[in-house]
Amino acid sequence: MAMPRPMNISLQTRLLLAALIEAPQRWRYGYELSRVTGLKSGTLYPLLIRLSDQGLLEASWEDDVVPGRPRRHLYRLTANGRALARQQAREKSGRVTFGAKEKLA
Amino acid sequence: VSTSRIRKIAQALALHAARTLPPSHAAWGEAMVGEVERLGDDWAALDWAIGCAMAAYYQRTGTMTNTWTTSLRWIGAALLGVHAAGTLLVANLALVLNLQSPGTLFAPGGGPDASALGQAYPAFLPQLLSAPIAAITLWAGAGVLYLVATYRLLYGRAGVATVLAAALALDLLNVFVQRALPFTSQTVYVGDWRIGTMIALLLPAVGFYLLLLQREQDGAEGAR
C-alpha cells in the first residue's frame, strides 16, 4: 500500500504519532494515549479512526479476558505509520510551537 | 449526584456513541464502551464518554451525503439569516425610539413609564424604550455577527462556529442585561423570558451542527 503524502498534518495528529512511535511495538489503549498526548476522547478517536482507515494504525483486542470485564481496544502503528511518524519527527521538529514541544516532552 | 448515577450516565452516553457510529466503525463503538467500563473514576468515565459521543457525531456527519449536508447548510443559513435580520431590526427600532426620548438612552432601565404609552402599543415597545445603550449595542453586535456567520456558512468558509459562538454570547448576555432591568410591564418580562429560552435552546442546536461541519472540514484538511 502506498503511503499517503501528508502535506499538512495537524498538531494533534503529530502528537499522537509521536506518542505511538515512542514504543512502536507496544500496544497502547485509548485512555493511555489520551493521558500521554493530552488529547480528549472527542479528538483522539477521530484521529485513531482516520489513521486506521489510512492503514497507518493497526488495532487489536486485549488478550487477557477477565470475566465481567470488557476487553480494551489496543493500537499501534503499522510499518507505514512508523515511517510517517519518523518522517514527521524529522521534518516538523523545528517547526512545532513551544507549547507542543512541552506536550511532546 | 451520586457517583453510581454518574457512572450510569457515562455508560449510557458510551452506548449512545456506539449506536451513533456508522456500521462500518462498529468495532470503535465497542472500544469506546469498553474503555468507559475500564475507567475507575466515575467523573473521568463521564468525561471520556462525552468525548466519545462527540467523536461519534463527528464520524456520523462524515458519512452523510453531500446533498444532505448541503440541504442542512442552507437550512442553517436561512435560520441564521432570519435571526440576524430580526436582531438588527430590534436594535434599530430601539435606537430610533430612544433617540426620540432624549436623556433616556444612557440611563439603564430609564425611559418613559409603559403605562403612559397606552394599551395600543405592542408589548415589546416598553422594553425597547427602556433599553440602555448597552443592550442596543449588544443587539447590534450580535446581529452583525449572525450576518457574518450566515455569509461564511453559505460560502463554506471556516470559522462559522466561532463567529456563531461569539454572536450567541452577546445575545445571551443581552438577555441577562435585560432581565436585570426594572421592567414596568410583566408581560414584557415574560415575553423576554420566552425569547431568551428560544435563543438558549434553538440556536445552540444550530451552532452544534455548525461545529460538527467545521470539524468535518478541519478533519478533511488535516488528513491531506
Image (tube, coloured by chain):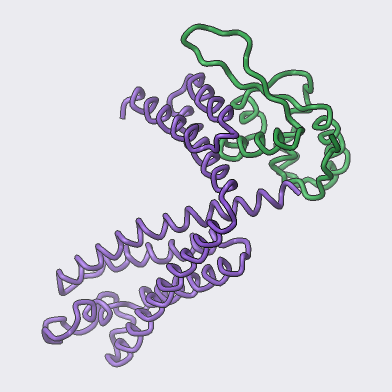
Chain colours: A green, B purple
Residue at position x 43%, y 66% from top? B170
Q: Residue at x 30, y 86 (%)?
A: B98
Residue closer to the observer: B53 or B110: B53
Could you tell whether B29 is left or right of A84 in the image?
left
- Residue at 72% x, 42% y: name it: A100
* Number of numbered discs: 0
Task: Name the residue nearer the viewer: A99 or B78.
Answer: B78
Residue A51 location (% of width, % of height): 71, 36
Residue B105, position as x, y percentages in the image:
32, 83
Question: Taking B73 as reference, is A29 left or right?
Answer: right
Quadrant of the image occupied by residue B171: bottom left
Residue B109 position in % (x across, y down): 25, 75
Look at 58% across and 68% down and name the residue there. B152
Q: Classify A64 as above or below B16.
A: above
Against A68, residue A51 (above or below) is below
Q: Which quadrant of the figure contains the N terminus of chain B?
A: top left
Observer able to see residue B58: yes
Up/down of B166 relative to A16, above or below:
below
Q: Quadrant of residue B186?
A: bottom left
Please state which of residues B20 and A5 is positioned toward the viewer in this rendering: B20
- Examine the rendered structure and indicate whether residue A19 appears above or below residue B149: above
Picture coordinates of residue A88, whole percent (x, y): 83, 39
Asked if one can make out residue B116 in the rendered structure from this viewpoint, the answer is: no
